[in-house]
Amino acid sequence: MPPYMQDVSDAGKGFSEGWSVTNSVNTELYIGGYGKGNTKWKNRLAYEAGMSAKDTDYMHIVNWKAAEKLFKAGKYRKVNGHALIPMEEMIAANALFLLPEAKSPHGADVSPDGRYVIVSGKLDTHTTVYDFKKIFSLVEKKDFAGKDPWGIPILDMKKAIHTQVNVGLGPLHTQYDSVKGVVYTSLYVDSMVVRWDYLKGKVLNKIPIHYNIGHLLTAEGDTVEPDGKYLIALNKLAIDRFTPIGPLHPQNHQLIDITAGRPMQLLYDMPLPLGEPHYAQMIKADKLKPVVRFAKKSFPDYVKAGKERVERNGNQVTIHSTAIRSHFSPEVIEVKVGDEITWHITNVERAQDQVHGFAVDSYNVHGSLEPGETATFKFVADKEGVYPFYCTEFCSALHLEMTGYLLVKP
Ligand SMILES: [Cu+2]
């Protein structure tokens, strides 16, 4: 890649399978220098201005199937253990192109059928819908508008566009609905979500968000078959939603009903102890097939209930323990000063989500054991005395009683 600042990417699918797009900023190659105290320059523009000098930056378009052929032909070199195909090889193989996009772009989101990619430039009120059919045609005909300083072909922006839509201030990311043509774009400056039609090129309606929205998601919105119905605004910077409790205000997400045929409706503010996650997915719950407990075979030192024991070999002491509500077994363990302890503990709970903790605090031994998990702690018992060990997860009504003693004898 050329030395621009590459930002968000999306993979092609369906029509654009095997291709990817990556946004970039600072195609100006600006190197800063604003403010007093600069040792090199005076009176330079700040990065934010110097990086936004040109009206457009470059979307990087990569043909991964062509890259795969180059890799198989050995046209790469190893950098830190990774195969790196040099830019010249990619250019020669017609595998890397640039396409102008509105400056300081953020989201690049490929449509469910892979035919289009929607790009929003934060400093442009328009979102741009590019048509891969047009892009591939330009690539095929080698209809280029020029080359960048590294010799990468630049496609003609106007010839690659399906439509541009004036959606509002500060458009960022776009997510797809189950309804054909309908998409949702976050508007950072307006604090809104705009619902619009990228095929017909028109705005449908908007809903205010009570925070500065960044990313957003729709149910299965990044897949070839979005589910619609719900959207979550992933927010930062509460505007006026809460009584201020200090310099940092709470940051919540908002769940929005996007059922087709009626205005979008705010359903719920969702408290999360962190600001806007960058990308998140909403999927149907029945797609999750979680394990209930770890398999024995995952842990060679698994301790079977009833087979708990303490083994000594010289000054090497191996403790095989189990944990289940609300006791450790064994509960009292005697060792000698200087013994090297290897302590295996298996959580033998059959109940779902029944976690236990383990601590020998004086020896700075701490752990957490999920159902079926075996953990191993190693330390030298170098201080004589009576040291309690105990569960550190509030596991049951008798959690406080889930304790034992390590006796270190002189
Ligand atoms: Cu416990």
Image (tube, rainbow, N blue to C red):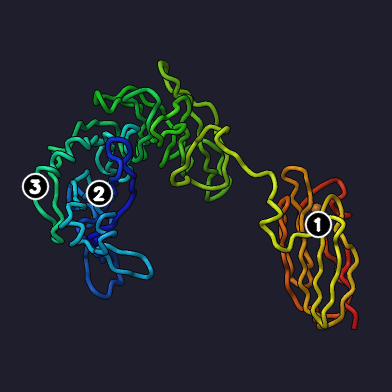
Q: Secondary structure at mark 1?
A: loop
Q: Which mark is nearer the camera, 1 or 2?
A: 1
User: Dot 1, how many residues are within 10 Å of its Cα: few (below 14), some (14-19), or many (20+)?
Assistant: some
Q: Which mark is nearer the camera, 2 or 3?
A: 2
User: Which numbered circle lies on residue 63?
Assistant: 2
Write down the quadrant of residue 45 in the picture: bottom left
Q: Amino acid at mark 2?
A: Asn
x 31%, y 36%: residue: 14
* Mark 2 touches mark 3? (CB < 8 Å): no
Q: Is residue 45 visible?
A: no
Residue furthest to the top in view is 261
- On the image, numbered disc 1 is attached to which residue? 304
x 26%, y 26%: residue: 199
Q: Which mark is nearer the camera, 3 or 1?
A: 1
Q: Secondary structure at mark 3?
A: strand
- On the image, the x and y values in percent for residue 243 come to 57, 39
